[in-house]
Amino acid sequence: MMDPTHDQAIRALAHLVHSVRPSWQAKSVELVLLQDSRALDVLAVAAITAATNPATIHPKGITTTHPGPRECSRCAERNRAATVNAPRVTRCDRGHPSFAPGPCGPCHAASPDTATKFADEIRAAM
């Protein structure tokens, strides 16, 4: 049986997270927080960090958020392992789909100065 004071603190934290991230329902956040075994102060920092991170889509992301220096090195390793670096499709200035920031492939091919620019940089670096 959990301590009633702990349950109240979790409920209050869930409402705080809901006020920071209104798209997350307070009850969903509360259920995730109740399943997390970390200390309340660490859990609070993780919850607010996850709520303010636009990349965290679901409240369950609180469990994979490990706040900075207050956590152990194992937590930081788990956090890095849980991160998925998926390429994002964006558009360049001319409307071509691109996976990298800046000019895309067709824009580079259309620019006659690109080959010369990189050749000069390579020669300068040697």
Image (spheres, rainbow, N blue to C red):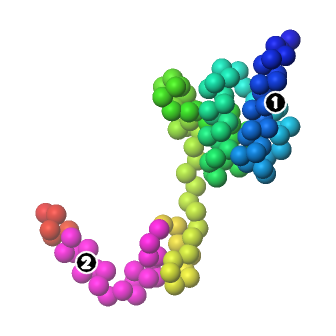
The answer to whether 31 is drawn above or below residue 3 in the figure is below
117 is within the stretch colored magenta: yes
What is the x, y in percent for residue 124? 14, 68
11 is within the stretch colored magenta: no
Q: Is residue 111 left or right of residue 118?
A: right
Q: Observer-nearest residue: 41 or 58? A: 41
Spatial CA distance of label 2 from label 1 is 59 Å
| Callout 2 amino acid | Lys
Residue drawn 53% across the image and 72% down it: 98
What is the x, y in percent for residue 125? 16, 63
Q: Dominant secondary structure of the magenta stretch? A: helix
Tell me the SS state at disc 1: helix
Where, quadrant-wise, is the C terminus in this rendering? bottom left
Residue 66, which numbered label?
A: none
Pointer 2 and pointer 1: residues touching (CB < 8 Å)? no
What is the x, y in percent for residue 2? 83, 14
The answer to whether 2 is drawn above or below residue 27 in the figure is above
The answer to whether 122 is drawn above or below residue 60 in the figure is below
Circle 1 residues within 10 Å: few <14, some 14–19, many ≥20: some
Q: In this view, does 11 lie to the left or right of 94?
A: right
Tell me the SS state at disc 2: helix
Q: Name the residue under label 1.
A: 11
Q: Report the magenta residues as a range.
A: 101-121
* Residue 32 appears in the rendering: no
Residue 117, which numbered label?
A: 2
